[in-house]
Amino acid sequence: MTFPAFFAAAPALRLRDPLAKFLGASDDGIIEYGYADAVRLAGHSCPAVAGAYLMVRAGLDYLYDDELPERGNIEVHLRDARDQGTTGVIASIATLLTGAAAEGGFRGIGREPRFARKDLLHFDAEIGGRLGMRRRDTGRGVILDIDTDSVPHVAEMAGLMPRVLAGPTELAERRRFGELWQDRVRRMLLEHADDPKLIHVYDWA
């Protein structure tokens, strides 16, 4: 599989994971995630996947400032039900990057479990944005929202998308559709990753 070149140019996330260090998966416990990891998990690249990736990135930056974020030390709250819209996609990306899992997550090690990630992911949360994140050690929280309309498709997509969705089309048109689809994702990740018009960040007291 060959990914578009911009995947590797997208902002990466570095976290320390005490569980990875404890079990010897990483000598120093530091793990780096890139956008390609989110695509492998989701199985596709789209504005929802890119938006989830950027929201979690912005949340970690807010919660940890210049400190390296600790994977497994973050609660994640989603405003919507798990089966509503793109909530499941956002949740899966959030779990990948933060370690926070729902009831089926890792239960921890030992009689008084250490490194547990179970029950750190919550749905139907009463929050004012799509996603909420809170550090378990300090209690500091952040609310995040996204406005993908601030990075729209190019005008050509308006006529092309209905033709591609309607049924068989010329190979050139299908390729062009994929190029334009990924161009929007590219602009989100490379040109608007820190744009407050795209990712909205609010303190969560």
Image: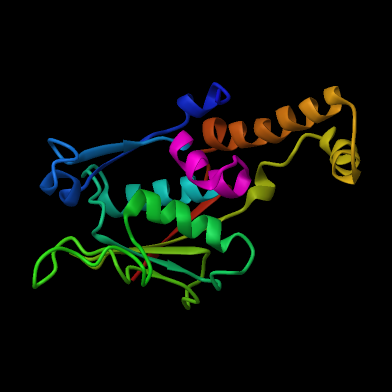
Q: Residue furthest left?
A: 111
The total number of labels drawn is 0
Q: Position of residue 45 (x, y in %)?
A: 59, 40
Q: Quadrant of the N terminus?
A: top right
- Horizontally, residue 30 falls left or right of residue 174, namely left
What residue is at 62 percent from the left and 45 percent from the top? 47
Q: Is residue 192 above or below residue 203?
A: above
Q: Position of residue 73 (x, y in %)?
A: 23, 59
Q: In this rendered view, identify the residue nearer to me: 34 or 54.
A: 34
Figure quadrant of residue 15: top left
What residue is at 47 percent from the left and 59 percent from the top? 91
Figure quadrant of residue 176: top right
Q: Is residue 101 above or below residue 166?
A: below
Q: Position of residue 96 (x, y in %)?
A: 39, 50
Q: Quadrant of the C terminus?
A: bottom left
Instruction: Give the dominant element type of the magenta stretch: helix, strand or loop.
Output: helix
Give the color scheme: rainbow, by chain, secondary structure or one colour. Answer: rainbow
- Give the magenta range: 36-50
Q: Is residue 156 above or below residue 195?
A: above
Task: Answer whether residue 183 is magenta in the image.
Answer: no
Q: Position of residue 143 (x, y in %)?
A: 43, 63
What residue is at 34 percent from the left and 47 percent from the top? 61
Task: Answer whether residue 41 is magenta in the image.
Answer: yes
- Horizontally, residue 154 falls left or right of residue 48, namely right
